[in-house]
Image (spheres, rainbow, N blue to C red):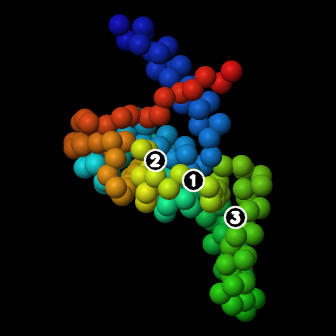
């Protein structure tokens, strides 16, 4: 029975990777919690233990969304630190941080993402959302509450929509 289920699991993972490759960093952040262990979830808040990337941050407020991965965060921090060492003011440090993150994004296309044209509200992200993944801890806060988080505790989840459906790539 296990041998019959294994090909389905492999094809589902491959399908998630292909779908995530076609989406922006902010859109694909839900992939980080896929297959995780929900510690606590209650419609607007979730804490899940999950594998995968060690750091990711995504935030959405109305039609503006920002996402940053580990490499871009390190590049931004190093750039701001270097600018501070050269005596730059707040504006210079911010410009250096954005430039550092932009350079990493140029070579690794999914590490730094800023969108000004998102929907003000959608069923997956609500109006305001903050998602943070550090090591194995995935935390999400969303307002207004949505069904993408659902209700869960101790590894069991219910009343959630699950990941977005995969659209055909044709």
Residue 100 in the image: state x and y as whole percent: 73, 68
In the displayed structure, 122 sits above or below 164; it is below
Which of pointers 3 and 1 lies earlier in the amino acid sequence? 3
Q: In which quarter of the image is the C terminus?
A: top right
Which of pointers 2 and 3 lies earlier in the amino acid sequence? 3
Nearest-to-viewer mark from 3 and 1:
1
Marking on residue 101 = 3
- Marks 2/3 in contact by CB < 8 Å: the verdict is no
Q: 53 left or right of 155?
A: right
Task: Give the spatial CA distance, label 3 vs label 1.
Answer: 21 Å
Marking on residue 38 = none
Q: 105 left or right of 113?
A: right
Disc 1 designates what residue? 118
Is 124 in front, or is 86? 124
- Marks 1/2 in contact by CB < 8 Å: the verdict is yes
| Residue drawn at (53%, 27%) of the image | 166
Marking on residue 122 = 2
Task: Give the spatial CA distance, label 1 vs label 2.
Answer: 9 Å
């Amino acid at each position: 029975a296990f041998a019959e289920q294994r090909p389905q699991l492999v094809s589902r993972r491959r399908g998630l990777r292909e779908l995530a490759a076609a989406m922006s960093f902010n859109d694909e952040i839900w992939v980080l919690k896929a297959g995780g262990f929900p510690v606590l979830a209650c419609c607007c808040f979730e804490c899940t233990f999950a594998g995968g990337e060690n750091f990711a941050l995504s935030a959405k407020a109305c039609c503006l969304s920002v996402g940053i991965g580990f490499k871009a965060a390190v590049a931004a921090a190093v750039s701001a630190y270097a600018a501070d060492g050269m005596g730059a003011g707040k504006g210079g440090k911010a410009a250096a941080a954005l430039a550092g993150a932009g350079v990493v994004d140029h070579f690794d296309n999914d590490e730094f993402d800023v969108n000004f044209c998102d929907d003000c509200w959608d069923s997956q992200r609500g109006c305001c959302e903050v998602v943070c993944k550090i090591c194995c801890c995935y935390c999400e806060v969303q307002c207004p509450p949505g069904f993408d988080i659902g209700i869960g505790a101790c590894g069991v989840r219910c009343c959630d929509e699950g990941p977005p459906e995969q659209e055909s790539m044709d």
